[in-house]
Image (cartoon, rainbow, N blue to C red):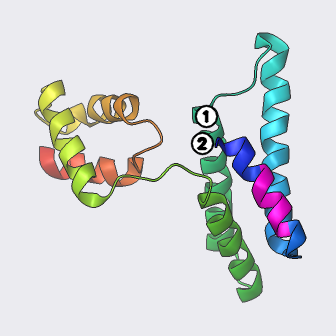
Amino acid sequence: MNVREQLQAAIREASEHDERRRLCTLRLMQTAIRDRDQAHCVGHGEKITHGEIAALLTRMIKQREEQIADEHDPQAVREAATEIETIREFMPPLMDDVALHSACAQAVRDVGAAGLRDVGRTISTLKKRYPDQIDVGRASNLVKGMLR
């Protein structure tokens, strides 16, 4: 089942169980995807890819994380955290620490990285090999640690 189908099923389920907060978040996600589809369709005549959906959901999560950092109201923080949890359900799973460390070490070897100035090339390689599977911030810290 793809993300669009999962989202539609989750909307039905949230509606049946009267989960209003979850339903609002799910509809917001669905609308964001539909808007991107329409904007993308103008030039290409097709829907956005799974990777583009993942990038869109990642941006939505980052917006809420920034909101949490700036917010002082505990209720608003809880609501934003709940929205993040809901959005993450539809994200592809990230690599665990062991797999990420292994992937970073392999990328460092493959790129021939010798110093900190090679971090960008290494991260770029990781992004190409493992789209939507790595946390770029964690990977960057690991690579920097390997190259110091």
Q: Amino acid at mark 2?
A: Ala
Q: Label 2 belongs to which residue?
A: 54
Identify the element where label 1 is drawn: helix
Q: Amino acid at mark 1?
A: His
Q: Residue 133, percent across and down?
A: 42, 45
From mark 1 to mark 2, how far is it between C-alphas? 6 Å
**In the displayed structure, would residue 50 be above or below residue 102?**
above
Say few, some or many: other residues with alpha carbon within 10 Å of mark 2 (under 14 / 14 to 19 / 20 or more): some
Q: Look at the image and give the residue range highlighted in magenta.
A: 8-14
Pick the residue in front: 126 or 86.
86
Q: Position of residue 105 (x, y in %)?
A: 16, 42
Residue 3, quarter of the rendered image: top right
Can you tell which mark lies on residue 116?
none
Residue drawn at x 77%, y 55% is: 9
Characterize the magenta stretch by its predominant secondary structure.
helix
Instruction: Identify residue for label 1.
Output: 50
Q: Is residue 109 above or below residue 136?
A: above
- Give the crowd class for mark 1: few <14, some 14-19, many >=20 residues within 10 Å: some
Which structural element holds mark 2? Answer: helix
Mark 2 and mark 1 in contact (Cβ < 8 Å)? yes
